[in-house]
Image (cartoon, rainbow, N blue to C red):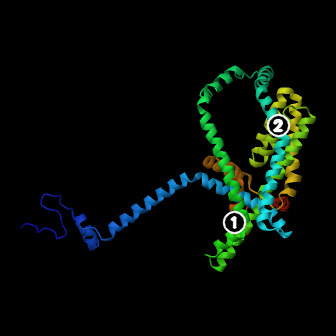
Amino acid sequence: MPVPPDSTDTTGDDGPRLTPAERRLMRELPPHWRSPVPPRWLPRALMMVALGVFLAVMAWRAAGLLGNVITILVISWFIALAMEPLILWLGRHGIRRTLATGITMVGGLVAAAGMLALMGGLFVSQLVDLGKSIPGYYHQLRLWLRKEFEVELPRSNELISAISDYADDIGTRVLSVTAAVAGTLFTFTAVLLVTYYMASQGPKFRAAVCRYLAPHRQREVLRIWELSQDKVAGFINSRVVLALISTVATFLFLTVLSVPYAVPLAVFTGLVSQFVPTVGTYIGGAAPVLVALAVDPIKAAIVLVFIIAYQQVENLVLTPKVSQKSLQLNPAVAFLSVLAFGALFGALGAILALPVVATIQAVGSTYFRRHELVESELLAQEPSRKKKDDHEPEAAQA
């Protein structure tokens, strides 16, 4: 007798037949899954997915186009946080906040202009002379390395010819350089305006944000705001003070030692050593050591000893006093944050990496609960001497 077809076999005579296992699976599926008609919610779900992808792409493109605006906001935000302690101090002496903000900003600009006026001409002239003297210093260094260590470096004319290959089209880039200068001036002006409004209207801005939050949320937001403000302001101000002290000390030492181009070398050492974590000290100190090495190897050794000694004094004496209210970052975290922000946002990101991470760590230390550590050898930095002494008699008795 012919076997009657299974009722779940929906294929036609010309289509492939279902196996018994496939027919059992079809019987176990829900009825709407076996139906050839798609469910009603499928078109709407596909439309929502397409709309979500479209909005995500548009948001990504908008973030890319508004990169300069975001940069201006971030820079202005951190400058306003750094200005806040002085604005509050002026306010406690009876000066209105708008006027106190203007006094702080104008005072900072006047101080910067005064430093540039006093040291700018000397800095530029020495920097130009240093650029002109680099080939001669390189030639002396090349001869000294070949004589003492038998290390052969490329000739200076070979390096110059290699560099000139990249600078042949410099005349065609005048317009791009002009546009870059104009863009920098626009960004600088925008940063000043946004910083003024952020600092002068700080309480009103915070009040406008808190009006949309419940009372307990308002307290949390204000607490985070105050914490980040204190930490970031202390961090930035302490870095500036330490950079200034390092610059002055390095300048005086190089001047006494008669090392040429003391001003640009001291400024480079002070800024790099404070704003580039972990390796900034070595990078900043390498420049004066190399210049002194081209003049006299003995002077180079003396400069190297000074850089190492000053770093110890700074770590043990200056930093604890200047940075006692600022946030101390783990060196590895700070170095990785600079690399990450530099890769994402360029040189500006590398400069702003430390205050950004300081803010994140300040907020995280407030809201992440910390627990007591368990006793383990993996958590001990060094073996306990007392425990060793306790185990030694036991081992002797055994």
**SS category of the residue bearing label 1:** helix
Percent across and percent down for residue 155 are 71, 20
Q: Quadrant of residue 362?
A: bottom right
Q: Which part of the image, by quadrant, shows the N terminus?
A: bottom left
Q: Which residue is identified by label 2?
A: 121
Res. 381 visible in picture:
no
Q: Which residue is identified by label 1?
A: 363
Percent across and percent down for residue 86 are 82, 62
Percent across and percent down for residue 398 are 81, 60
Distance (Cα) linking label 1 and label 2: 43 Å
Residue at x 79%, y 33% (from the top left corner): 127
Of all residues shown, which one is farthest toward the bottom? Answer: 215
Residue at x 69%, y 76% (from the top left corner): 219
Mark closest to the chain's N terminus, 1 or 2: 2
Name the kind of residue labelled 1 in the image: Val
Percent across and percent down for residue 301 are 87, 33
Residue at x 86%, y 68% (from the top left corner): 93
Q: Quadrant of residue 269?
A: top right
Q: How many labels does the image show?
A: 2
Q: Nearer the viewer, mark 1 or mark 2?
A: 2
In depth, the one of 265 and 124 nearer the eye is 124
Name the kind of residue labelled 2 in the image: Gly
